[in-house]
Amino acid sequence: MEQSPDKIMTRLAYFGLLPFIISLICIWADKTMFGLSAQKVFIAYSAVILSFLAGILWGNAIDHIKHKLSRNALILSILFSLIAWGVLLHSPESYVMSILVLLFGFVAVWFAEMKIRQVEKEGRPEGYQPMRNRLTGIVAVLHLVAMAS
């Protein structure tokens, strides 16, 4: 039986939390992952997902290219990707600062995407924004827990 794209999107979005959770468990257990510290794995995955979300912001900007917010969204999407890259380059020196910067990035990209969707009165796919709100909240909590670990 074929699943709808909405169901696939939702499942993949929530499955995307697993690497955060698994790496947090490994941080607590003082275990390595893939020959790397669990902290590095958490930061690397976080940076990749932040870049992925920045790409979604880029796509939203392209979809609404005639709107004045599009220019800002395009610039922000590149900025978020560069921030994620910078964190990857500097993460060995400052674990807590890296996590804090990534946490800021997740909240900022969520806020930017939400504002664009509000201005454009974008309601589809139905349930997307509540899902993004929940996921961003969970990711923020996981980052706070990682900072405290």
Image (spheres, helix red, strand yellow):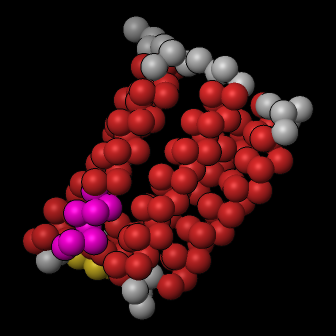
Say if 38 sits above or below 74 in the image. Answer: below
117 up-or-down from 24: above or below: above
Location of the C terminus (image quadrant): bottom left
Determine if residue 123 is in view.
yes
Question: In the image shown, does 44 or 102 lie closer to the viewer?
Answer: 102
Foreground pick, 50 / 115: 115
Q: Is residue 147 magenta?
A: yes
Q: Residue at x 36, y 81 (%)?
A: 95
Q: Is residue 122 magenta?
A: no
Residue 64 as seen in the image, left or right of residue 13: right
Residue 9 in the figure: left or right of residue 140:
right
Q: Could you tell me residue 135's position as x and y percent?
A: 37, 40
Where is residue 139? Give x, y as percent: 35, 51
Image quarter where the N terminus lies is: top left
Quarter location, residue 111: top right
How many marks the image carries: the answer is 0
- Say whether residue 53 is visible: no
Magenta stretch, main secondary structure class:
helix
Magenta range is 142-149
Residue 61: quarter of image: top right
**On the rendered structure, is 38 left or right of 51?**
left
In the figure, residue 137 lies in which quadrant? Answer: top left
Vertical order, 6 against 67 (above or below): above
- The single residue placed furthest to the right in the displayed view is 66
Seen at 64% across and 29% down, the residue is: 117
Relative image position of residue 45 (x, y in whole percent): 42, 62
**Looking at the image, which residue sits at the far bottom?**
93
Q: Residue at x 41, y 79 (%)?
A: 97
Q: Position of residue 60 (x, y in %)?
A: 71, 36
The residue closer to the viewer here, 1 or 140, is 140
Give the residue drawn at x 84%, y 33%: 67
Q: Is residue 34 above or below residue 107?
A: below
